[in-house]
Image (tube, rainbow, N blue to C red):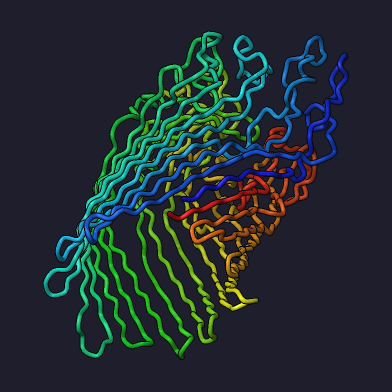
Amino acid sequence: MTVTHGYYDTRTEGVQGFGSLVSPTTGAPTFAPDGTLAVRTTGEDRHVKDGASTTVAATVGLPIGPEGFFDVSAEYNVRNPTNRTGFDPRQQYDLIGGALDPREFTFNRYSHRYGDAKTQDMKLFVNAGLPLGSATLYAFGSYNFRDGESAAFYRRPLAADGRSIASIYPNGFLPIINTTLEDVSGTTGIKGEIGNGFRYDLSVGTAKNKFDFQIKNSLNRSFGPSSPTAFDAGGLRYTQTVANLDLSKELDFGGLKSLTLAGGAEYRRETFKLRPGNGPSYLSGTFGGAAGAQGFPGISPTIGGQRVDQLRARHNVSAYAELDAEISDAFTVQAAGRYEDYSDFGSDFNGKLAARFELVRGFAIRGAASTGFRAPSLQQQFFSASATNNVNGVLLETVTLPTDNPIAIALGATPLKAETSVSYSAGAVFTAIPRVTLTVDVYQVSIDDRIVVTDNLTASRTNGVPSGTNPGLAIATILNNAGFNATNAARFFVNGVDTRTRGIDAVLTYRADLAGGKANFTAGYNYNETKINRVLAAPGPLANIPGLVLFGRQESLRLTDGQPRTKINFSLDYDHQWIGFNVRTNRYGKTLAAGTDLFGDVPLAAKWITDVEVRGTVSDRIELAIGANNVFDVYPTLTPTGRGIDPVTNAARNYGATNYVTPYSSFSPFGFNGRYLYARASVKF
């Protein structure tokens, strides 16, 4: 049994505490150059303690007869939320006679929640085996439940925002998104050996997932003062059933040290459906303004004339064969092939060749080449929902549509194709020096018809009539001509890009006796670069819209620059009698957080993140440990605010006011929560 408790104790680097407003209490207010209210700060970074987390985990193994077993593992975790928002310097209330509302000076400007969600998890796993003569009957299964709570953007009471209702929330409100996730799975099988040395493994498994949304502390503005404040926003359902048969046999083939033949077959059936929310979560009332629950509009039963709660299902069958040949002590070869046939995507064959050759004792080279095939998931094909997205600092109601939805078809959507890939790798392994292992591998993976989601295709209208300039005017015209004049923005999945990823991976390990104890050193280096070779041209009527961006810079950068190209890691693990420690540090290379034409991209500098743990064995049964993740309290580069110079283009920029409340980019590869302290106790019984 293990019990772990920890929390974040951090100073939010570069984000100072809120002091007071500079604006006078009478007369015209004072605004900063970027349009926000001028403020004084405390001059010091905020000191925050939050995100407390406790985990209790235990495993018990029980016998079944003389050789069988039944293992049960359980874990319970509760985690409080983290919040790294900055203060919100924007005007919150309408002016009174040209002066600030007095509440402006007492408003809690840490009104947003920007960080990890509040969660509560319960997990149970069982694993059992029972010999039956020459065979073994086995079974395993799991049950997982998670209750989560996160927040949307704060809705100001300011009338110009058009999102709050004064009689319900006179000071604005923070919509809370509660989620419940339930996973259940079970598998049973039998394995053993039959005549002529054939090993077999036959199994059947099934799993079910439920994901539901409950929205609280919110409202449907189009319902006016009579709007409810809590909503059932619907959910998602997914099931999968798999039957597997694997066979293998050692063959005696003259001249070869060993030869193994393996093969098998699989049948898989999947289903997916959406569960609509209750009426007030998605309906449009007569009061005007945004329809649906603020923060997360409910799933409507019908979008674009299409029912979203219909059960979507498919099945596929596959078969594979593999040969592993050990030509000699120094040379091995592997060849494999797999055939798949989908009920909705047809069939495909893929193969792999791999080899390893030890040139001299302690030095070997290896290489592999393979092709790949991935059918679109049911979720990519048929997910449909509304959401509120922050686009250029404006909260925009957006629908994500399946490709067979009439709205998506009107915009040019076509059925998705499967992704295909070709991969190559080559490397070397060095073990000639005792206790030292060095591996170096280079690789290339090319993916064609990669599935991505389009940018928000935003319609521009005035009182339902197309207006403004392209591309918004043209998109509104297309939708209106198709009879859809209520959609603000739409997006859908497409086979949008071809990509090529190249990289190198190197790992060095050294095991040593040090100061009477045992030490393990590890050093690693990875370089990884993804390039977009092709971008899908705008389909259908979208092809004729000047200035349209189908797959924008933000999603493109997420593929090419959203992850560090370089990563370096070092670790030392040491044990001496009853005490030990572990130190590891990782260098995440620079990334580029995608901005917009208005706000610009933000380079995120390379950072070192260091974790430390010290542990001690109190007795044969009890071990205690204390540690710190990100011990030096490192944060990613700040998101720019106010007026400044774009760090990429050197152009003058007026950054979005919402950057104040999201001071760190979600593109950060190591998050933005700061230092985490913890203690752990383990007991064996």
Q: Residue at x 35, y 58 (%)?
A: 373
Q: Is residue 198 above or below residue 465?
A: below
Where's residue 74, x and y in %?
A: 40, 46
Where's residue 364, x and y in %?
A: 46, 84
Q: Is residue 42 left or right of residue 190?
A: right
Q: Is residue 346 left or right of residue 101?
A: left
Camera-side residue of 81 and 621:
621
Q: Is residue 84 left or right of residue 292?
A: right
Query: Is residue 623 among the parts visible in the rendering?
Result: yes
Q: Is residue 151 above or below residue 127?
A: above
Where's residue 670, x and y in %?
A: 62, 52
Q: Residue at x 35, y 49 (%)?
A: 72
Q: Is residue 367 left or right of residue 243?
A: right
Where's residue 465, x and y in %?
A: 53, 20
Give the image quarter of residue 583: bottom right
Camera-side residue of 545 and 261:
261
Query: Is residue 525 among the parts visible in the rendering?
Result: no
Q: Is residue 236 above or below residue 512?
A: above
Q: Residue at x 58, y 74 (%)?
A: 518
Residue at far left of view:
195
Q: Quadrant of the C terminus?
A: bottom left
